[in-house]
Image (spheres, helix red, strand yellow):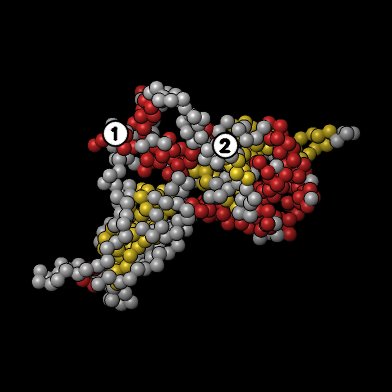
Amino acid sequence: MAAVREVRVPDIGDFRDVPIIEILVAEGQRVARDQGLVTLESDKATMEVPSPAAGVIRSLKVKVGDTVSEGHLIALLESEGEEGDHAEAAAPVPASAPATGSAPVSPGPALPQAAASAPAPAPSAPPTMTPPPPERSTTASLPYASPAVRLYARRLGVDLTKVSGSGRKGRILKEDVEAYVRGALRAPPAAAPAAPAPGEAAGLRLLPWPKVDFAKYGPVESKPLSRIKKISGANLARNWVMIPHVTQHDEADITEMESFRRKLGEEHKELKITPLVFLIKAAVAALKAFPHFNASLDESGENLVLKRYYHIGVAVDTPEGLVVPVIRDCDRKGILDLARELAEVSAKARAGKLSPGDMAGGCFSISSLGGIGGTAFTPIINAPEVAILGVSRSQYKPVWNGERFEPRLMLPLSLSYDHRVIDGADAARFTGFLARVLGDLRRLLL
C-alpha cells in the first residue's frame, strides 16, 4: 500500500527564512529517492531539499519566493509501497541535480488513504479530517521582487514595502532599490547622524550603473551569472565598500619547507600534500601570536570580539565560482590530517555539495593562486573577518646569504587587513612572523 508522507526542510544549520528560488517538480510528478524537490538560496550557498523516497508528488505546499526554515512543510509525497505501485505510472523522471548534502527527511505520520487517492470522495461521504499543516511563510504580503533583489535590499537595509517597482506588473528591480537609496541619501536628516555601524550605507552617493547598448559596437552574447557569483558578488561589493582595505606584501623563503613537503609526499603517496596545509598551520601560529587578527567587530562597530578557536577558510575555485569552505580546529590537527580534510572539502566544493554550515564560522581566510600564477594581488576581506592572506606563485630568486647569492624558493604573501582594527605596523609584523615560520617549520613547535 502507498502511504502519504510529509516532506519537510531538513537541518540547514543556523539559517532562518531562506528563500525558495526554484521548484524542481510539479504536482502529480513521479520522483526518485533523493531527487531535488526545491532549491533554497541563503546568502552563502544554494541547496536542494531531496525527496526521502520514490513516489508521486500529491501536493506542493510552497512556491517560488516563499521563505522557509528547518521543519517547514514542503510537499506531500505518496511514497511507493513494496508492490503494485510501480506499474501505475511512467518511468521515474531523472533527478535534475544531486542533493547538496542535506540530510534525508524523516517521514511524518501516514494520512488517511482518502486524502491521497486520486478520485474525489462520494458526495455522501463525510469529509476526511487531516491535521492542519504548520504555519508557513506566504508571499501574499511580500513585495513583488526576486530573491536576489530581496537579498540586495536586506544588505542595504532597505524596506521593500516602501519601494515602488518599475518592472513588469510592478516587479521591484535592483535599479528601483538603488533609486530609493539615492532618494533617502538626498533627504535632509532629522538629526545629526550617529557613527555608521558595519554594513550601513555611510552616506555613499553612487552614480547609477551605466546603461550601454553594446550591440551597437559589434557582436555580443549574453550569459547569466551563476548563482554563486551573484551571491558572492553582493558580499564582495559590500565588503570592499564598507571595509577600509590595506594590503601588506612580503615574501617567505620556503626552500626547506618545499623539500620537506616533497619528502612527505613520497612517504604518503595516498595523500596530496600541498603547500596550503603548511600555510594553514603557519596562519594558526600567527593568529595566536597576534590575537586581534583572530577577531571580528560586533554589529555596533565599537567592540572587538576575540576568538579562542582557529577555523581557517580556504578559497576553492569551482566551475560555478569561488567558494570558501572552513576547516575547523586547525590548531588541533597535524599536517597529514589537514591534507586529508583539505582534499575532502575541495572535492565537495567542486561537486557543489557544500552546505551553509561548511562555510560558516571562519576566523581567517587564505586565497592561494600559487597553482595559477601571478606575483601579488589584493584579496578582499571575508566579513566579518578582519584579515585575509593571499598567496601567489613561488619562484627561485638570488638571495644574499652574507657571503654570496644563492637560489632560494620565495613565496609571495599578500595580507589584506581591516584598517579599523589593524595598524600597518602590526600587519608588517604579522607577515614577517609568517615568513619566519614558513622559512623554518621548527618554529611551529615553540
Q: Which of the two labelled residues, at mark 2 and mark 1, occupies the earlier sequence position?
A: 1
Q: Tell me what residue is drawn at x 80 percent, y 38 percent.
A: 407
**Which image quadrant for residue 415?**
top right
Element under disc 2: loop
Side of 199 relative to 65 (left or right): right
Q: Where is 87 relative to 47, above or below?
A: below
The three-letter code of the residue at mark 1 reads Gly
Residue to which mark 2 is pinned: 302
At horizontal 33% and vertical 58% (from top left) the residue drawn is: 74
Residue 89 x/y as whole percent: 26, 67
Instruction: State the residue in front, 213 or 361.
Output: 361
Q: Nearer the viewer, residue 319 or 293?
A: 293
At a point 57% along the width and 36% down the height, the residue shown is 302
Residue beneath the point at 78% across and 52% down:
445
Please tell me how crowded label 1 is: few (under 14), some (14-19), or many (20+) other residues with Cα within 10 Å.
Answer: many
The single residue placed furthest to the front in the displayed view is: 191
The reply, left or right, for residue 81 in relation to residue 280 is left
Position of residue 282 in the picture relative to residue 179 (left or right): right
- Secondary structure type for disc 1: loop
Closer to the camera in the image, 119 or 302? 302
Residue 22 placement (x, y as % from top left): 34, 50
Pointer 1 residue: 165
Three-letter amino acid code of the residue under disc 2: Glu
Q: Residue furthest left?
A: 124
Coordinates of residue 35 in the picture (x, y in percent): 38, 60
As measured in the structure, the alpha-carbon distance from the residue carrying label 2 to the one carrying label 1 is 37 Å
* Position in image of residue 222 (x %, y %): 38, 35
